[in-house]
Image (tube, coloured by chain):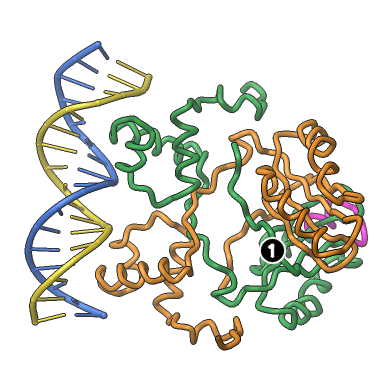
Chain colours: A orange, B green, C yellow, D blue
Amino acid sequence: MAARNEKTFQDEGLDKIDLKILRLLQGNGRLTNAELADKVGVSPATCHRRTQRLFEDGYVRQVRAMVDPGKVGRGALVMVGVVLDRSTPESFAQFEKAIARLNFVLDCHLVAGDFDYFLKIRVGDMADFNRIHGDQLIALPGVRQTRTFFVMKEVVDNAPLDF
Amino acid sequence: MAARNEKTFQDEGLDKIDLKILRLLQGNGRLTNAELADKVGVSPATCHRRTQRLFEDGYVRQVRAMVDPGKVGRGALVMVGVVLDRSTPESFAQFEKAIARLNFVLDCHLVAGDFDYFLKIRVGDMADFNRIHGDQLIALPGVRQTRTFFVMKEVVDNAPLDF
DNA sequence: GATGAAATCCGAGTCAC
DNA sequence: GTGACTCGGATTTCATC
């Protein structure tokens, strides 16, 4: 398979209409096909086929109701930098496998720099986090140290993609 | 109005049925009201009223089509720690105002610790980021220094809330 | 005050063109 | 890509508890 350059995504089968559909659905995933067709300027049938293809081909991974974290007891956000004992593939694999089971971890990214991983975690409050940190984070396989950054103010959280 | 503790969110008017609706819609925001009613075990009419209230009362902030970043030319993820020159309210406010205009910034959080802010940024590739870093990030008001962490592997990105 | 059954209306999904 | 047609779901009404 040929290598793909993200810059050429418009050549991969996405025209102006597809992009417009994607942007509109990102803004409001509940738009009916009729509304969508009207805003995009094509017939409902065409819009329906376009949208279906965008889902089938994986341009839209899923449609998700974004629940207000504070209203369901997950109002506290914490960023955590993690350093592992060893930088071996096995060490990384073991850590990643263990992380995937922790449902309070929203993001986990392997990074280049002073840390091995960055985590984004949502919990109820600081006490929750301290318990989790002691019970589950430092107990993860191969963790040498963690550095915790409590979020004091969420300026922008999970902004929509600009494309 | 009485102070609210997030831990008591089940007392704020969310019963088992509401929670089930929220979880199902978080998993699939395209569920029809009929499907939802069936899965939850109530009549379509009741389900519709419940769901409507969850939207009106802000439990669901929005429903969003999650677009595959790589397929629209935003395949590169970068975390950036920012330190400001001065830690004054004016300095913070100015920075936050400027950040809000940068549409490649997905997250911007004021944190406690070695940095003032943490940013999560999506761009096309490393070259893109280097240009943006030089043009726009270090040019932000009051920025003393930035530390860049390129994401080498997205282990978990934007996991759904567990509640 | 919330529920579920029924009745209406409108959009999803499919067809021929 | 469009227009039309059918079926099923969204939404409202209403009786009921």
Give above or below for B13 relative to A4: above
Residue B88 inside the magenta-drawn segment: yes
Numbered disc 1: secondary structure: strand
Q: In the image, what residue occupies the spot 83% across and 72% down? A: B138
What's under tag 1, amino acid-wise? Glu
Task: Give left or right: position of A46 versus B159.
Answer: left
Which quadrant would residue A115 be assigned to in this image? bottom right
Task: Give left or right: position of B113 versus D8.
Answer: right
Residue A133 appears at what percent x and percent y?
Answer: 82, 39
Residue B124 appears at what percent x and percent y?
Answer: 65, 78
Residue B110 appears at what percent x and percent y?
Answer: 79, 51
Q: In the image, what residue occupies the spot 31% across and 70% down? A: A47
Task: Give left or right: position of A4 versus B112.
Answer: left
Outermost residue, front direction? A90
Q: Where are the magenta residues, as a range?
A: B84-94
Q: Label 1: how many residues lie within 10 Å, few (<14), some (14-19) or many (20+)?
A: some
Give above or below for B43 relative to A34: above
The C terminus of chain B lies in which quarter of the figure?
Answer: top right
Residue A73 inside the magenta-drawn segment: no
Which quadrant would residue B72 be assigned to in this image? bottom right
Letter of the chain that mark 1 sits on in the rendering: B
Residue B59 appears at what percent x and percent y?
Answer: 52, 39
The N terminus of chain B lies in which quarter of the figure?
Answer: top right
* Residue toward you, B154 or A19: B154
Q: In the image, what residue occupies the spot 48% across and 39% down? A: B22
Q: In the image, what residue occupies the spot 40% across and 38% down? A: B51
Which quadrant would residue B37 be assigned to in this image? top left
Residue marked by disc 1: B154
